[in-house]
């Protein structure tokens, strides 16, 4: 096995493989502290993230086995592509979003993130802003209104559907 030839693949799958660890940590700490990580499916806020975590674990193991067994025909190149700056900008935006959403709240950070992502993808500013606000409200209506999930309120303790 050529470890160096597949270093980028290993790095990508190791990053994806850490997500289940983060989900398990949140389920055991913050969700458990809030009392929403146990009980039936309707009252267990940790059920969906746990399902996603297990799916990621399986995908990570399958791809690790593919790399080890040589089932991948070509390794992923380390050369940047024309879309690399877009991917890096989107990643940076998500990191900033994750760091600020608990402080500023869902209704402030989410439209800003989505508008920036839509603009990066080439939409005009008015369409990007309108789409961001609409998507934010639809997701909030589904999660807060229908599923009774508390979205991050932030320093303003603002909610529309909760």
Image: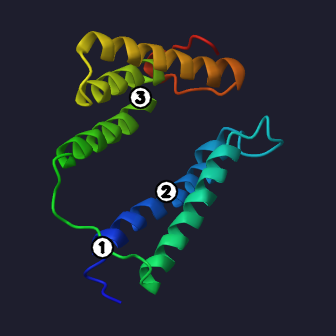
Q: Secondary structure at mark 3?
A: helix
Q: CA distance from mark 1 to mark 2?
A: 23 Å
Q: In this figure, what is the number of numbered marks? A: 3
Disc 3 designates what residue?
A: 103
Asked if residue 40 is positioned above or below residue 104 in the image, the reply reads: below
Disc 2 designates what residue?
A: 19
Residue 108 rendering spot, x and y as whole percentages: 40, 18
Extreme residue in the right direction = 40
- Between label 1 and label 2, give the one nearer the viewer: 1
Residue 53 rendering spot, x and y as whole percentages: 59, 56
Q: Residue at x 80, y 41 (%)?
A: 41
Q: CA distance from mark 3 to mark 1?
A: 41 Å
Q: Residue at x 30, y 87 (%)?
A: 2
Disc 1 designates what residue?
A: 75
Q: CA distance from mark 3 to mark 2?
A: 22 Å
State the image quarter where residue 96 is shown: top left
């Amino acid at each position: 096995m050529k470890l160096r030839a597949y270093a980028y693949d290993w790095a990508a799958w190791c990053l994806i493989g850490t997500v289940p660890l983060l989900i398990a940590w949140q389920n055991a700490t913050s969700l458990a502290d809030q009392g929403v990580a146990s009980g039936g499916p309707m009252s267990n806020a940790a059920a969906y993230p746990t399902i996603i975590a297990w799916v990621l674990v399986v995908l990570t193991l399958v791809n690790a086995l593919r790399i080890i067994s040589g089932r991948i025909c070509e390794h992923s190149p380390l050369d940047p592509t024309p879309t690399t700056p877009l991917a890096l900008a989107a990643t940076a935006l998500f990191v900033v979003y994750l760091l600020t959403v608990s402080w500023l709240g869902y209704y402030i950070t989410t439209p800003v993130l989505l508008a920036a992502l839509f603009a990066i993808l080439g939409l005009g500013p008015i369409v990007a802003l309108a789409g961001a606000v609409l998507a934010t409200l639809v997701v909030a209506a589904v999660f807060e209104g229908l599923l009774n999930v508390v979205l991050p309120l932030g320093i303003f303790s603002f909610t529309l559907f909760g």
